[in-house]
């Protein structure tokens, strides 16, 4: 079914679209796959622009602003910190604005991608909520992973206590897209209200106070 949603037949755009859809899932696995996905999407888009001989996508104020910021960070690492690790981080920061430009192109050329991204979000949130509450009740998750902290749950993240951070940062996208794709009726309103309560409770159980605050702050804007 996913094969039928591609308007642009370029293999670079096809692979980038799939990586974009699977990004919420790759974030759960840890920083490696998610960072690799972001980097590959950016590289594939550059290859695509090179093949098409069209770099007009980068001619906008957003990219120019981040380009200036990137130069500043690289120069700061070179002259102030004199730290190789800091220089590496600053240099490869450029992949993020390229990633954003690539995602804009992917979405503008095929809006259906957003719906599949939403399904990916729903899947991740559903599994994390089920697994998180299971771990809170029984002390271990569905895969038998024990709770690393007595009063904090982490679900599939293991000893990395970032469950609340993951949910709080993606929840504005989740609720925003839910309002777009869910029909305007009482059942869907109740679904969103119940989901909000469950997510808020799960973040509270994760023990991340900053994430709990940010989630409720984001809810006001939503």
Image: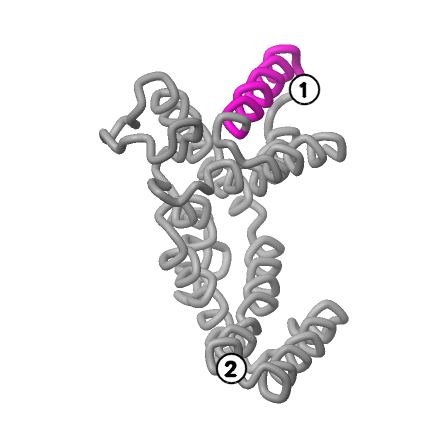
Which image quadrant is residue 75 in? bottom right
Residue wearing tag 1: 184
Element type where label 2 sits in the image: loop
- Magenta stretch, main secondary structure, is helix
Q: Is residue 193 magenta?
A: yes
Q: Which of 8 and 67 is in front in this view?
A: 67
Residue wearing tag 2: 83
Rendered location of residue 51, percent (x, y): 48, 80
Spot the residue most to the bottom: 79
Q: Is residue 34 magenta?
A: no
Q: Which of marks 1 and 2 is in front?
A: 2
Stretch in magenta: 184-203
Rendered location of residue 49, percent (x, y): 53, 76
Q: Looking at the picture, does residue 53 appear above or below residue 149?
A: below
Residue at left offset 56%, top offset 75%: 90
Q: Looking at the picture, does residue 197 appear above or below residue 82?
A: above
Which quadrant, please, contains the C terminus? top right
Spot the residue most to the front: 150
Q: Looking at the picture, does residue 20 appear above or below residue 81?
A: above
Cα separation between marks 1 and 2: 54 Å
Rendered location of residue 160, percent (x, y): 39, 45
* Mark closest to the chain's N terminus, 1 or 2: 2
How crowded pointer 2 is (Cα within 10 Å; few <14, some 14-19, many 20+) is rated as few
Spot the residue most to the left: 144
Element type where label 1 sits in the image: loop
């Amino acid at each position: 079914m996913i094969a039928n949603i591609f308007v642009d037949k370029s293999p670079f755009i096809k692979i980038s679209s799939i990586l974009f859809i699977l990004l919420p899932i790759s974030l759960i696995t840890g920083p490696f796959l998610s960072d690799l996905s972001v980097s590959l999407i950016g590289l594939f888009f550059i290859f695509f622009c090179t093949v098409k001989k069209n770099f007009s996508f980068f001619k906008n104020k957003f990219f120019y602003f981040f380009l200036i910021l990137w130069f500043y960070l690289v120069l700061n690492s070179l002259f102030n910190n004199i730290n190789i690790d800091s220089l590496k981080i600053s240099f490869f920061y450029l992949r993020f604005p390229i990633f954003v430009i690539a995602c804009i192109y992917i979405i503008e050329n095929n809006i259906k991608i957003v719906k599949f991204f939403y399904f990916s979000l729903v899947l991740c949130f559903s599994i994390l909520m089920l697994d998180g509450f299971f771990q809170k009740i029984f002390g271990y998750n569905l895969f038998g992973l024990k709770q690393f902290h007595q009063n904090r749950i982490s679900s599939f993240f293991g000893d990395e206590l970032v469950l609340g951070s993951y949910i709080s940062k993606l929840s504005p996208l989740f609720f925003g897209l839910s309002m777009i794709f869910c029909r305007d009726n009482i059942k869907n309103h109740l679904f969103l209200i119940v989901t909000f309560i469950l997510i808020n409770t799960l973040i509270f159980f994760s023990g991340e106070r900053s994430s709990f605050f940010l989630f409720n702050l984001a809810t006001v804007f939503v």
